[in-house]
DNA sequence: CCATTGACTTAAG
DNA sequence: CCTTAAGCCAATG
């Protein structure tokens, strides 16, 4: 790993945003990408999450896809870890789908930026 | 170095 | 409403 690579910068930005997600809240890859100015690169956010493995400071379980589906749960240590963590924060998950997703949605664009 | 893939999203048919 | 296509870019073979 070359920390000198500028690509690391993007990952770090993703980590910072994810770390700012309040407990009991979730957001989407696209929203984070949009906040970082790379709307079309939502995949890279997911890739950043993959690199975020082993980082307890990065609650990757609070990041889901646009529909509120736990698409990345299979990439966790075990497929149940993600849902378990969300439920521990008061989020109800049924069939990999976050119930009342809109109510738990946290948009960095709306919460961090603006004005 | 080229081809394929992927924790996504939007648009079009 | 469901299926394809395309755009994005890093990582992997």
Image (cartoon, coloured by chain):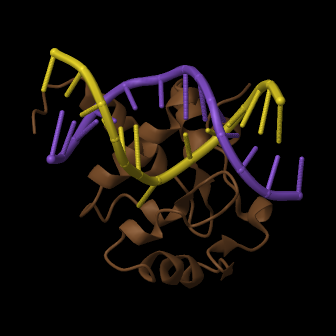
Chain colours: A brown, B yellow, C purple
Q: Which residue is drawn at 67% across and 51% down?
A: A66
Residue A6 to residue A72: above or below: above
On screen, residue A63 versus residue A2, left or right, reads right
Q: Picture coordinates of residue A106 (x, y %)?
A: 66, 53
Residue A70 to residue A35: above or below: below
Q: Residue at x 67, y 72 (%)?
A: A97
Quadrant where the N terminus of chain A sits is top left
Residue A108 to residue A67: above or below: above
Pick the front one: A29 or A35? A29
Residue at the outermost left position: A2
Pick the front one: A91 or A94? A94
Quadrant where the C terminus of chain A sits is top right
* Quarter of the image where one finds residue A54: bottom left
Q: Picture coordinates of residue A69 (x, y %)?
A: 63, 64
Q: Residue at x 57, y 60 (%)?
A: A22
On screen, residue A94 versus residue B6, left or right, reads right
Q: Picture coordinates of residue A60 (x, y %)?
A: 43, 60
Q: Which residue is drawn at 59% across and 40% down?
A: A30
Q: Picture coordinates of residue A71 (x, y %)?
A: 53, 63
């Amino acid at each position: 790993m070359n920390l000198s690579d500028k690509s690391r910068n993007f990952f770090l930005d993703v980590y910072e945003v994810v770390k700012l997600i309040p407990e009991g809240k979730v957001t989407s890859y696209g929203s984070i990408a949009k906040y970082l100015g790379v709307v079309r690169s939502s995949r890279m956010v997911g890739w950043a999450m993959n690199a975020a493995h082993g980082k307890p400071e990065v609650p990757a379980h609070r990041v889901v896809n646009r529909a509120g589906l736990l698409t990345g749960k299979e990439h966790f240590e075990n497929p149940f870890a993600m849902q378990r963590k969300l439920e521990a924060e008061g989020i109800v998950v049924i069939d990999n789908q976050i119930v009342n997703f809109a109510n738990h949605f946290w948009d960095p664009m709306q919460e961090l930026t603006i004005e």
